[in-house]
Image (cartoon, rainbow, N blue to C red):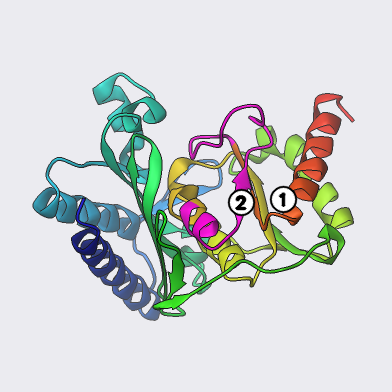
Amino acid sequence: MNFTELRSVAERVARQVGERMISVQKGAGPSDVRLKAPDDLVTEVDLWAEEQVREAVRLHFPDHLVIGEETSSELEIIHGKTLAEIASNGVCWIVDPIDGTANFVNQVPHSSISIAVTVDGDPVFGLVYHPYLDELFVAQKGRGAELNGASIRVGAKQKLAEAVMATGFPHDRAEGWPRYKHLHEALLTSSRKLRMLGSTAAELCWVACGRLDGFAEYHIKAWDVAAGVLIVREAGGAVASFLERDAPYSIFARSILAANNELLPQLLTAAEQAEAQHRAGM
């Protein structure tokens, strides 16, 4: 695989999408905002952005498959398989065209473009671009992680009680809140500070460069985490799923924890205790 060409294509399209996002926000904002599900928005820019990635992949890597947030359901129907099964064989680009659409719609300058390339389901390249800060996070498996060309490492906190954590809200609050409230309580009581910023991919990158000490969330999708997971790992951090602890971590897992190697076991204990409380109906 030609990683130089791959990076060039991914960076070019990510910056193109970022320019469009900023241009739209400087104007009247997105013109077509729809609900995909309760509290889950999509705009014309999301759809346009994903198509830009598809066109670039078709042109430069015609044998590669694209799994994008906005067209994933169609892909499952076409193949008659789950996304994890589809990605388990061959090379896939896993794309979140705008991670943080609600922020984008409300002109909050914290959204990102996330592009990962996987081989048989394992991320080998990850890129996350934050257009408002003009920050480009990139990682290649076995080659480290960088921010705007400079090497990055996770933070050095040793105790969860000293950590600044980030998490998210469920898209379906009626179904998700009973579980989330236990996780949020656990994070609030066990860490120094808890933040909810609205872009999973960006927050994983902030764990990778030490701005955040950890991240925890339920009900995430592969496009939310595929690039960020590799960037965290290549920056010396670790990831896990507290709902599928007995299996090797997969980007298709239903939950994620990310931190340095000292904090992750403490974070895993807190998250598992929260999950036990949820299951006990407390």
Image coordinates of residue 198 in percent, x first then y, are 58, 60
Task: Examine the residues drawn in magenta and state their main secondary structure.
Answer: loop
Residue 94 to residue 128: above or below = above
Q: Residue at x 35, y 70 (%)?
A: 21
Pointer 1 and pointer 2: residues touching (CB < 8 Å)?
A: yes
Image coordinates of residue 162 in percent, x first then y, are 84, 66
Residue 208 to residue 133: above or below = above
In the picture, the disc for residue 35 is none
User: Is residue 40 one of those drawn in magenta?
Assistant: no
Give the residue type at disc 2.
Ala
Pointer 2: what residue?
238
Question: Where are the magenta residues, as a range?
Answer: 230-254
Q: Residue at x 18, y 51 (%)?
A: 57
Q: Earlier in the sequence, mark 1 or mark 2?
A: 2
Task: Say few, some or many: other residues with alpha carbon within 10 Å of mark 1 (under 14 / 14 to 19 / 20 or more).
Answer: many
In the picture, the disc for residue 264 is 1
Image coordinates of residue 240 in percent, x first then y, are 63, 42
As helix, strand or loop, the secondary structure at mark 2 comes to strand
Q: Does residue 44 appear to the left or right of 61 in the view shown?
A: right
